[in-house]
């Protein structure tokens, strides 16, 4: 993670509230620079929300929320959750949850000390509520043969379109953040990268590819991986000047929705993978973390105004064919959206 921390050292204080909640092991978020504002109250009951198609999941101050059928509901309540994802039918929500345990750590000098060890699990549950399922435990072992706990940070969960495979980023504290695909039936894991510095996994609609943000070079960009083959990553080269991060596929699989950072400005873009044709969907310089709706007619994203981050949705209209999008619709009301978490949109 060190490369990303060097590149994006000047991250917004508003975003650092979320980032600190997960510890330095979380990958760096990129967003607009905003002033500190008082912490808003997190909603704890079902609230009315503007109606948009399908199911939207997002994070507020460490908890996961869902908007569906004009209502906003919270899915978690302990303030340790981030990076929500949805199954393609919107019935299952996944997220990363931070944990801490008293353990033992070896310092660079060789000295063994007691320490609090951080980790993160990947958890799933029905988006309608109910029991949770621990899919990937970040606490891998307690008091192993050497007397240490074994922990990892499992981040950026993404469920394949058929619901059979889980992609995620694994950071075991050794300096790498690699892309892993796990078969949910057999629990067999396939590590697609080796010693990489990756983030933001997202599946293609056909389930054959996964796109990640790569921080292995001075300028962030995207690598597309074959989902069933180690070492298959191909860097996408047809991008505008700037720092590109947090891509997700369009419903037809031909384009990526992503954020382009140029200087201190962040805007939501869409790029056609084959041709490199790029369109800026926002131009205000304070919008990021875009995802398309399942029908391809909308895009949801985060936007900062007056030091407060909210979730917005915008009907694309003719924006992809040279025209203009419709005005953005504000979906939340200043409750304090986690700026480091990309929303998820499903049926």
Image (cartoon, rainbow, N blue to C red):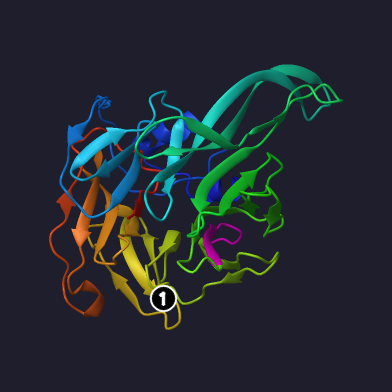
Does 251 sit above or below residue 2? below
Which residue is denoted by mark 1 in the rendering? 254
Query: For the point 68% across and 45% down, which residue is it?
Result: 175
- Quadrant in which the C terminus appears: bottom left
Residue 192 x, y percent position in the rendering: 67, 60
Residue 134: image quadrant is top right
Residue 307 visible? The answer is no
In the image, 13 versus 118, the foreground residue is 118
Q: Residue furthest right?
A: 145
**In the image, residue 14 above or below residue 305:** above
Q: Is residue 44 above or below residue 290?
A: above
Res 246 quadrant in image: bottom left
Query: Percent x, y for residue 277?
Result: 36, 80
Does 189 appear in magenta? no
- The residue at the point 29 percent across, 65 percent down is 295
Q: Which residues are magenta?
A: 209-219
Is residue 45 in view from this perspective?
A: yes
- Viewer-closest of 122 and 118: 122
């Amino acid at each position: 993670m060190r490369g990303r921390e060097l590149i994006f050292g000047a991250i917004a204080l508003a975003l650092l509230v979320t980032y600190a909640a997960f510890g330095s092991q979380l990958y760096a978020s990129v967003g607009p620079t905003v002033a500190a504002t008082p912490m808003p109250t997190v909603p704890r009951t079902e609230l009315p929300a503007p109606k948009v198609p399908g199911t939207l999941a997002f994070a507020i101050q460490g908890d996961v929320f869902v908007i569906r059928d004009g209502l906003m509901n919270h899915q978690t309540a302990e303030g340790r959750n981030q990076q929500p994802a949805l199954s393609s039918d919107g019935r299952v929500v996944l997220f990363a949850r931070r944990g801490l345990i008293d353990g033992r750590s070896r310092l660079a000098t060789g000295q063994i000390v007691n320490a609090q060890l951080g980790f993160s699990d990947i958890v799933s549950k029905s988006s309608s509520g109910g029991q949770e399922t621990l899919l990937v435990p970040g606490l891998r072992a307690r008091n192993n043969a050497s007397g240490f706990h074994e922990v990892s940070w499992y981040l950026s969960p993404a469920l394949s379109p058929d619901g059979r495979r889980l992609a995620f980023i694994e950071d075991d504290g050794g300096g790498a953040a690699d892309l892993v695909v796990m078969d949910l039936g057999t629990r067999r894991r396939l590590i697609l990268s080796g010693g990489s510095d990756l983030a933001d996994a997202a599946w293609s609609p056909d389930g054959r590819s996964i796109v990640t943000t790569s921080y292995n070079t001075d300028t962030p960009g995207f690598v597309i991986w074959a989902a069933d083959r180690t070492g298959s990553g191909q860097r996408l080269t047809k991008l505008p000047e700037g720092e590109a991060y947090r891509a997700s596929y369009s419903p037809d699989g031909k384009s990526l929705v992503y954020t382009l950072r140029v200087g201190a400005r962040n805007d939501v873009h869409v790029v056609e993978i084959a041709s490199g044709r790029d369109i800026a969907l926002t131009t205000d310089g304070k919008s990021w973390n875009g995802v398309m709706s399942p029908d391809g007619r909308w895009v949801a994203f985060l936007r900062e105004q007056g030091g407060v981050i909210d979730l917005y949705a915008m009907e694309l209209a003719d924006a992809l064919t040279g025209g203009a999008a419709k005005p953005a619709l504000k979906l939340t009301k200043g409750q304090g959206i986690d700026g480091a978490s990309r929303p998820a949109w499903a049926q």
